[in-house]
Amino acid sequence: MHTTHGGTLVDAIVPRPSDRTLAIARDAALVGAGILLMTLAAQVNIPWHPVPLTGGTFGVLLLGGLLGMRRATLTLGLYVLIGIAGAGVFAEWSGGWDHFTGATGGYLIGYVLAAAFVGFCADRGLDRSIMSMVGVLLVGNAIIYAVGVPWLAAWTAPGAEAVLGWESAYDSGLQPFIPGDILKLFAAACLLPGGWALMRFIGARKDKKA
């Protein structure tokens, strides 16, 4: 994948081969690694009802910045599909259709949209500085909640006679996540520009030796 800014950080670390078959194999391997990373991130969780607190948002934001829009969207899309098909890639190694139709369905959709947005911005070089990346990741995180919280508010818990409602959705699906998400957001915002700074340092050292 080529962009006017030379691609994402992962493109700088693992350059795209000129051979088309090798390039496709490389991108497939990156998508597979991304799905594995999301699976592991989801296992870092604090049980919370009805939506667990996991490392998933960190994985989404980081992958968006690393992979760019196309690969990140494919990665998160496949991750969600694999999970709702029954593979244990969600929190506590769980999976199944009920994750999509239940309280967490909106957050899963938000994952895909947020990864696409962050990847779109990374493709255009906004992952090169901490300040720009903080803004991008704030919007990415907001996208997850913009889909997840209304979905949760409209969800009817098993045995309940009415939908959860906005107040309960805020109390259980947004407010508890904010402190942790701020930390995860700033960690991702530092990692991506930090990676670019390291690549520039390595490049400068090579130029001096040459």
Image: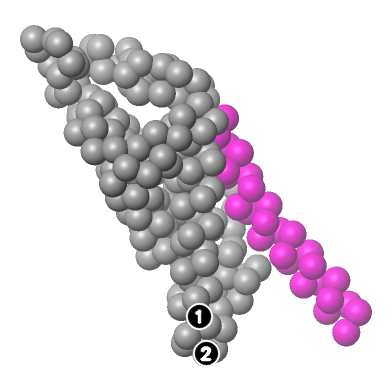
Q: Which mark is residue 141?
A: none
Residue 147 relative to residue 74: left or right: left
* Element class at badge 2: loop
Q: For residue 202, which quarter of the picture?
A: bottom right
Q: Depth check: 97 or 197 in front?
A: 97
- The prevailing secondary structure element of the residues shown in magenta is helix
- Picture layout, residue 146 above or below residue 30: above
Q: Which residues are magenta?
A: 183-210
Residue underneath mark 2: 19
Q: Depth check: 164 or 12 in front?
A: 164
* Residue at image location 14% in from the left, 10% down from the top: 160
Q: Quadrant of the C terminus?
A: bottom right
Residue underneath mark 1: 23
Q: Where is residue 71 drawn, in percent x and y?
A: 42, 63
Residue 74 part of the magenta segment = no
- Picture layout, residue 195 above or below residue 161: below
Q: Depth check: 36 or 205 in front?
A: 36
Q: What residue type is disc 2 on?
A: Asp
Quick check: marks 1 and 2 in contact, CB under 8 Å? yes
* Residue at image location 57% in from the left, 83% down from the top: 17
* Element class at badge 1: helix
Residue 204 part of the magenta segment = yes
Q: Where is residue 39 drawn, in percent x and y?
A: 48, 43
- Picture layout, residue 15 above or below residue 183: below
User: In the displayed image of the protein, which residue is found farthest to the bottom?
Assistant: 19
Q: Is residue 69 visible?
A: no
Residue 35 relative to residue 158: left or right: right
Q: Where is residue 136 drawn, in percent x and y?
A: 45, 47
Tally the marks.
2
